[in-house]
C-alpha cells in the first residue's frame, strides 16, 4: 500500500510471519524496470516505511519493492513493484486526508490481526493499550468511509477485537485474566490478550475502550451475520460492566483496582478531566448503573478560572479537553454547571485550547520554538520521560510539544490547529513524520524527537479531524441509547436555538444576521454548506448588548470563505445559559 503527499511517500505491506524473519529492506527506483536502490541502511522491524529522501521531491513517479531478510541474512525475492507520485497538497482537505490516513495506518498495520489488539506504542515489545483499542475501533469506521480499507475487512477486524474482549477470562486471579467485573486491565499482552505485568484494572481506559465498542455498534448496522454479531457482542461487553462495584457502592468511580490490594492507593474520578465520558456511560448503563447523584459528585471538584482572558474549567494537559469529545457531541447541550456559566463543554474546550495557545505565544518560561504555530502541551514523552504536560497554569512544561494536542483540538480551534499541523509537517517533516503519522512529541531546545508513535496520540488526531470535517463519529455515537440516557440522568438539556433574520448584502459580498436577544446573554453562530456538517464561527461567541444582536458573514475569519463564493450557506444561532 502506498500513500503520497508533499515530498513524502508512505509504504505498508503484509508482514512476513516466518519464525526466522530478521527484518525488511525497501528498494526504490525512478523506473519500473529499475535499477532499484536500497533505502534503509538497517533492517526494518515492522512492515512500514516513510520515504522522506526523495531526490526530485514532487512531480516524479517513484517505484518501490520490498524484500524480507532472515536471521542468516538470506533475502527473499522482491515484492511486486508499486508506484507513488509525491505532490503538493491541492487543498487543506487533501492535507487533512493524508494526515488522517497515515495516523489511521497505526491502528490497521500495528494491530495483531489475530485478536485485534493495538499496541500502546510502536516500540518493539509494547503491550496493548485498551484505550488505543477504543480509538482504533473508531478509526476503522473512518477508514472504511475514506476507502482505506473495505467494509468487509473492517467488519472482520472489529468482530475479532470484540470477541477477544467478550471471551477473555475474567476473575480475581493476578495472572491469566483479561479483567474483572466487566472491567479490563490497562495493558494486555499483544499475543495472549491477558494482563500484562502488574498493570491496574483501569476504569478510564475501560471507558475509552467501551466508547469505541459503542461506536462500532452503531457503525456496523448491516443485516449480515458478521455485523449482527458485532452489535450483540458489543451489548454483551457493555452490559457486563458492574459500575456500582467500581464505585464501591458510592457515587464516585474509583480510578483503578489491583487483585492484590483492591482499591487501595487509587483515588476517585472527581473534578474536570478526561473522566467525563466515564460518568456519562456509567449513568446510562442498563445494568448496574451509577446513581444519579454521581454527576453532582463529579462536578463538585470543578473550579472556574480565567486565563489569558478566557474563562473555563482549567485542566492543563489538552487530552483532558479532548478524549470525551472524540465521541460525545457536547456542542448543543449543557448540564446545570455549564448553564450557570453561560457555556457548554465544547465551548469550554475551545477556550482551554485558545488559552494554551496564548500561553505558548507568551512563553513565560522562555522555551525555544514556542509560537503561534508551534504550540500544544499534553501528556506525552519528553527528554526526561513521559509526563502530563500542560498549561495554563503550567504543568511539567519543559519545552516539549505534542502534535496530538493541536490535532485533537481540530473541532474546537480549526483556525489554529490546521496551521499548526501544516507548519509541523512542512518544517519538521524530516524529524516528525513517519509511516504512522506524527511522532509523539518533540523538544526543539533540546533537539529531541520522540522515537515512538502512540495509539492514544494517533487516535484523537484521526477522530477529531473527522469530527471537524464530517461530524460522522459524533452523529453515530450519539445514537446509542446508553449515551442519551446517561446525558439525561446527568441533567444535560439542549441549548436554545433562536429565530434568525437574514439580509443579503451583495455589494459587500456578505450576509447580515440579526436576532432578538437579551442583554448580557451569550450566543453562538454556526454555519453549514449542506445542513449536515456544521461549523462554529472561529470568531467565538457573541455577547448581546441590547434587545437585538447582529452578526455579519464576510468570510474569514468569521467563516471559511466569503458566502457569495459558494453555492449555498445555512446559518443557525443558539443561546448559552439556562433555558
Image: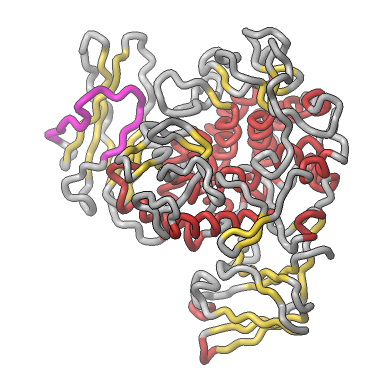
Q: From the image, which quarter does the C terminus lie in?
A: bottom right
Q: In this view, does 453 lie above or below 73?
A: below
| Residue at the farthest left position | 35
- Closer-to-camera residue (578/499): 578
Q: Is residue 473 visible to us here?
A: no
Residue at position x 65%, y 9% in the image = 174
Asked whether residue 50 is drawn in magenta, I would say: yes
Rendered position, 448 above or below 305: above
Is residue 40 shown to the viewer in this render? yes
Task: Please provide percent x and percent y for residue 362.
Answer: 45, 59
Dominant secondary-structure state across the stretch colored magenta: loop
Q: Which residue lies furthest to the front in this view?
A: 365
Q: Which colour scheme is used?
A: secondary structure
Left or right, 161 with respect to 122, comes to right
Q: Is residue 24 magenta?
A: no
Q: Residue at x 26, y 12 (%)?
A: 70
- Residue 78 position by quadrant: top left
Q: At x 69% / y 44%, what residue is drawn?
A: 272
Residue 547 is drawn in which quadrant?
bottom right
Task: Count the marks.
Answer: 0
Instruction: Tell me residue 483's x, y (percent).
Output: 76, 43
Query: Position of 137 compared to 386: left or right?
Result: right
Residue 344: x percent and y percent? 71, 58
Residue 392: where, in percent of width, then height? 55, 51
Region in magenta: 34-51
Amino acid at each position: 500500500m502506498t500513500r503520497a503527499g508533499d515530498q513524502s511517500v508512505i509504504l505498508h505491506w503484509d508482514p512476513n510471519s516466518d519464525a526466522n524473519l530478521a527484518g525488511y529492506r525497501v528498494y526504490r527506483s525512478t523506473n519500473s524496470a529499475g535499477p532499484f536502490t536500497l533505502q534503509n541502511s538497517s533492517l526494518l522491524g515492522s512492515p512500514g516505511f516513510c520515504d522522506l529522501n526523495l531526490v526530485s521531491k514532487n512531480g516524479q513517479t517513484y517505484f518501490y519493492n520490498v524484500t524480507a531478510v532472515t536471521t542468516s541474512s538470506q533475502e527473499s525475492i522482491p515484492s511486486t513493484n508499486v508506484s507513488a507520485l509525491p505532490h503538493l497538497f491541492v487543498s487543506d482537505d487533501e492535507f487533512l486526508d493524508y494526515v488522517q490516513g497515515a495516523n489511521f495506518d497505526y491502528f490497521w498495520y500495528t494491530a495483531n490481526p489475530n485478536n485485534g489488539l493495538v499496541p500502546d506504542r510502536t516500540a518493539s515489545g509494547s503491550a496493548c493499550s485498551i484505550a488505543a483499542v477504543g480509538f482504533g475501533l473508531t478509526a476503522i469506521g473512518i477508514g472504511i468511509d475514506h476507502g482505506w480499507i473495505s467494509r468487509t475487512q473492517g467488519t472482520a477486524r472489529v468482530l475479532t477485537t470484540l470477541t477477544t474482549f467478550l471471551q477473555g477470562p475474567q476473575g480475581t486471579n493476578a495472572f491469566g485474566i483479561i479483567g474483572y467485573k466487566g472491567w479490563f486491565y490497562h495493558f494486555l499482552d499483544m499475543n495472549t490478550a491477558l494482563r500484562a505485568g502488574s498493570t491496574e484494572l483501569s476504569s478510564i481506559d475501560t471507558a475509552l475502550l467501551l466508547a469505541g465498542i459503542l461506536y462500532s455498534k452503531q457503525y456496523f448496522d448491516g443485516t449480515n451475520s458478521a455485523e449482527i454479531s458485532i452489535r450483540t457482542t458489543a451489548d454483551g461487553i457493555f452490559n457486563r460492566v458492574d459500575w456500582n462495584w467500581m464505585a464501591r457502592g458510592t457515587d464516585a468511580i474509583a480510578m483503578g483496582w489491583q487483585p492484590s490490594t483492591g482499591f487501595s492507593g487509587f483515588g476517585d474520578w472527581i473534578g474536570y478531566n478526561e473522566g467525563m465520558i466515564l460518568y456519562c456511560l456509567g449513568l446510562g448503563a442498563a445494568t448496574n448503573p451509577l446513581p444519579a447523584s454521581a454527576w453532582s459528585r463529579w462536578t463538585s471538584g470543578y473550579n472556574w478560572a480565567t486565563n489569558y482572558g478566557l474563562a473555563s474549567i482549567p485542566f492543563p494537559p489538552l487530552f483532558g479537553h479532548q478524549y470525551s469529545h472524540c465521541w460525545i457531541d457536547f456542542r448543543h447541550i449543557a448540564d446545570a454547571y455549564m448553564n450557570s456559566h453561560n457555556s457548554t463543554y465544547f465551548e469550554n474546550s475551545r477556550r482551554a485550547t485558545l488559552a494554551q495557545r496564548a500561553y505558548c505565544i507568551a512563553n513565560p518560561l522562555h522555551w525555544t520554538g514556542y509560537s503561534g504555530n508551534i504550540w500544544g502541551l499534553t501528556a506525552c514523552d519528553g527528554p526526561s520521560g513521559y509526563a502530563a504536560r500542560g498549561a495554563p497554569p503550567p504543568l511539567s512544561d519543559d519545552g516539549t510539544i505534542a502534535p496530538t494536542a493541536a490535532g485533537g483540538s481540530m473541532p474546537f480551534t480549526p483556525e489554529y490547529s490546521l496551521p499548526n499541523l501544516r507548519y509541523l509537517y512542512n518544517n519538521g517533516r524530516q524529524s516528525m513524520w513517519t509511516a504512522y503519522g506524527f511522532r509523539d512529541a518533540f523538544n526543539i531546545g533540546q533537539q529531541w524527537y520522540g522515537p515512538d508513535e502512540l495509539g492514544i496520540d494517533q487516535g484523537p488526531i484521526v477522530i477529531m479531524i473527522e469530527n471537524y470535517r464530517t461530524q460522522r463519529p459524533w452523529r453515530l455515537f450519539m445514537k446509542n441509547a446508553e449515551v442519551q440516557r446517561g446525558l439525561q440522568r446527568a441533567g444535560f438539556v439542549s441549548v436554545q436555538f433562536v429565530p434568525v433574520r437574514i439580509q443579503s448584502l451583495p455589494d459587500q459580498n456578505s450576509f447580515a444576521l440579526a436576532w432578538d436577544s437579551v442583554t448580557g446573554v451569550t450566543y453562538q453562530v454556526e454555519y453549514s454548506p449542506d445542513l449536515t456538517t456544521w461549523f462554529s464561527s472561529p470568531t467565538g461567541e457573541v455577547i448581546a448588548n441590547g434587545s437585538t444582536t447582529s452578526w455579519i458573514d464576510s468570510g474569514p475569519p468569521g467563516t471559511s470563505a466569503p458566502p457569495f463564493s459558494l453555492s449555498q450557506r445555512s446559518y443557525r444561532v443558539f443561546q448559552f445559559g439556562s433555558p
